[in-house]
């Protein structure tokens, strides 16, 4: 899968993919990340990419020409399955969206800044608008990093058996059960004995019960709606 990301601060995104599972996905050739600096696509003086909004009001707006130049120049060599704008007024990202995006070949992510981007870009180029939650970030970059991580780890071959996504929280609308490792007893705190029993049917049943109980307590909303 290839993910291209348009940003005015592409350096912000150098760190998140240079380590751990994302790095391995890239090194294995399963994931390609291409950072595109919006300022390389403006024809305005001093690499300007934003301007005052028509009608007045505080805050700058990302101009249409640099964005369209960047998008169309990328589209010369890539057919995108989705052109995603990261914005706090988008659809809230969830595991189901991560699963769907992980099955695509080419994604283009566009990171918003300031008051947002000229609405005409949204009307004519964007196919999905995604938020990562109900709070405001100073730009879409951290949200883009969240999407890439959540999507990247689901690409077949990225995770090994130990890091398998099948037992993640949310994968079946349930939170994951508690986990334990050595030592079996620390101070007075004993690991649940069922986990030491070697009875895998019983262990699976215990984990399912724990998952259900945790979900009921912490996220009852997950048990109500099936697919968000
Ligand atoms: Cl995608 N962008 C910004 N700027 N703020 C956000 C967000 C995105 N998602 C939640 N807050």
Image (cartoon, helix red, strand yellow):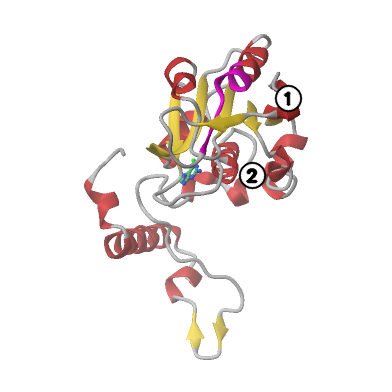
Q: Which element type, helix, strand or loop, lies under badge 1?
A: helix
In the image, what residue occupies the spot 49% across and 20% down?
121
Query: Which residue is label 2 attached to?
Result: 160
Asked if residue 19 is among those painted magenta in the image, a careful observer would answer no
Q: Which residues are magenta?
A: 60-68
* Residue extending furthest toward the right: 27
Asked if residue 61 is among those painted magenta in the image, a careful observer would answer yes
Give the crowd class for mark 2: few <14, some 14-19, many >=20 residues within 10 Å: few
Give the crowd class for mark 1: few <14, some 14-19, many >=20 residues within 10 Å: few
Would you identify the image quadrant in which residue 176 lies?
bottom left
* Residue extending furthest toward the left: 224
Query: Which residue is label 1 attached to?
Result: 45
Residue 217 tag number: none
Which of 107 and 54 lies nearest the eye of the viewer?
54
Whole-number angstrom distance, CA of label 2 to CA of label 1? 49 Å
Q: Which element type, helix, strand or loop, lies under badge 2?
A: loop
* Residue extending furthest toward the bottom: 188
Nearer-N-terminus badge (2/1): 1
In the image, what residue occupies the spot 66% across and 35% down?
8
Decide: is 132 above or below 74: below
């Amino acid at each position: 899968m290839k993910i291209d990301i348009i940003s005015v601060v592409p350096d912000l995104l150098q760190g998140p993919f240079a380590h751990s599972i994302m790095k391995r996905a890239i090194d294995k050739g399963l994931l390609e990340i291409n950072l595109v600096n919006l300022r390389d696509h403006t024809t305005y003086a001093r690499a300007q990419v934003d301007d005052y909004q028509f009608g007045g009001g505080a805050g700058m707006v990302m101009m249409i020409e640099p964005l369209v130049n960047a998008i169309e120049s990328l589209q010369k060599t890539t057919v995108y399955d989705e052109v995603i704008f990261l914005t706090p007024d988008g659809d809230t990202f969830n595991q189901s969206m991560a699963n769907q995006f992980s099955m695509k070949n080419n994604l283009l992510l566009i990171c918003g800044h300031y008051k947002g981007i000229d609405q005409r870009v949204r009307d004519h180029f964007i196919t999905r608008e995604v938020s990562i939650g109900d709070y405001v970030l100073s730009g879409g970059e951290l949200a883009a990093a969240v999407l890439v991580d959540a999507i990247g780890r689901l690409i077949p071959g990225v995770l090994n058996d130990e890091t398998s996504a099948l037992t993640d929280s949310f994968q079946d609308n349930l939170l994951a059960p508690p986990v334990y490792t050595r030592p079996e007893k620390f101070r007075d705190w004993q690991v649940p004995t069922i986990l030491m029993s070697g009875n895998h049917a019983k262990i699976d049943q215990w984990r399912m019960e724990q998952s259900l109980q945790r979900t009921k307590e912490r996220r009852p909303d997950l048990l109500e709606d099936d697919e968000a």
